Amino acid sequence: MTRVILSGCNGHMGQTITGIAAENPDTEIVAGIDINAGTESGYPVYDSIDKCKEEADVIIDFSSPAVLDDLLSYGIKNGIPLVLCTTGYDEAAVKKIEEASKETAVLRSANMSLGINILAKVLKGISGQLKDAGFDIEIVEKHHRLKKDAPSGTALLLADAVNSSVSKKLEYVYDRSGRSEKRPDDEIGISAIRGGTIPGDHDVIFAGTDEVITLSHRAYSKAVFARGAVQAAVFLNGKKPGMYSMSDVINNG
């Protein structure tokens, strides 16, 4: 049994994870952390992780970069691994996460779904060959109107997968307005669309001469991300300090 502290438990993703974890015989949420601590969740909820009294094996965070320092400190102090699902971290935060991984296990992913991480693996295998053959590469991502960061962490995850397999690193371009020139060869265009209740759509487009290849992933509900987070928590339970990824979870399965 993996005992979980769930940070961001009263948000949309937190509520979904609560439901998924309740159906999984290998997990139990023993406490939640949320600024709305008074909301009933079926387990104790605190407005700060420092107030948490329950013993746990893993922390899952689906909240905000603002609470990162507290979570890392708590994880290091108590020897508890962390599954970090929040996006929007700046470079300084990423460095803090890397430093923390030297003292406790940390799994960080911009997207917790199995499908996206399989797609990233596929991109690492094909992007170099297609780029060498003259294909231009574009990424289009779509999310609900409430999502704050753009481009999505998933779009950047996919772009990084592409960039890891090409011979010459490509520049990420988010806006072409104001430019009056043909498309340079050394870039990946990343476009963000926000509207409605779209859980997450991502298209990676390889546009060549007289042919186009599009690899797509569609999330039809937040449950795909919740399942991945719970799987990651079970995987990380008992792991030695270090940085882990969803690829490790997939390969372990």
Image (tube, helix red, strand yellow):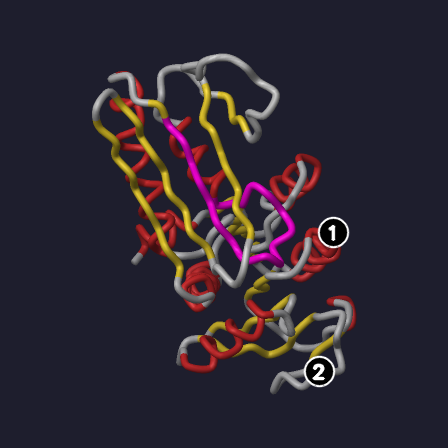
Q: Report whether 89 appears left or right of 241.
A: right
Foreground: disc 2 or disc 1? 2
Name the N-terminal-most of marks 2 and 1.
Answer: 2
Coordinates of residue 143 in the picture (x, y in percent): 51, 53
Looking at the rendering, the stretch of residues picked out in magenta corresponds to 137-154
Of the 4 image quadrants, the one containing the C terminus is bottom left
Is residue 46 rendered to the left or right of residue 226? right
Amino acid type of the residue that numbered disc 2 sits on in the rendered structure: Thr
Residue wearing tag 2: 39
Q: CA distance from mark 2 to mark 1?
A: 24 Å
Q: How many marks?
A: 2
Q: Are dots 2 and 1 in contact, CB under 8 Å?
A: no
Dot 2 surroundings within 10 Å: few (below 14), some, or many (20 or more)? few
Q: Is residue 44 above or below residue 252?
A: below
User: x, y (%) of residue 158?
Assistant: 42, 39
Provide residue 51's location: percent of width, then percent of height: 78, 72
Q: Is residue 140 magenta?
A: yes
Residue 165: image location, x then y, percent: 35, 25
| Element assignment for label 1 | helix
Name the image quarter holding residue 4: bottom right
Instruction: Please name the residue that numbered disc 1 is placed on.
Output: 69
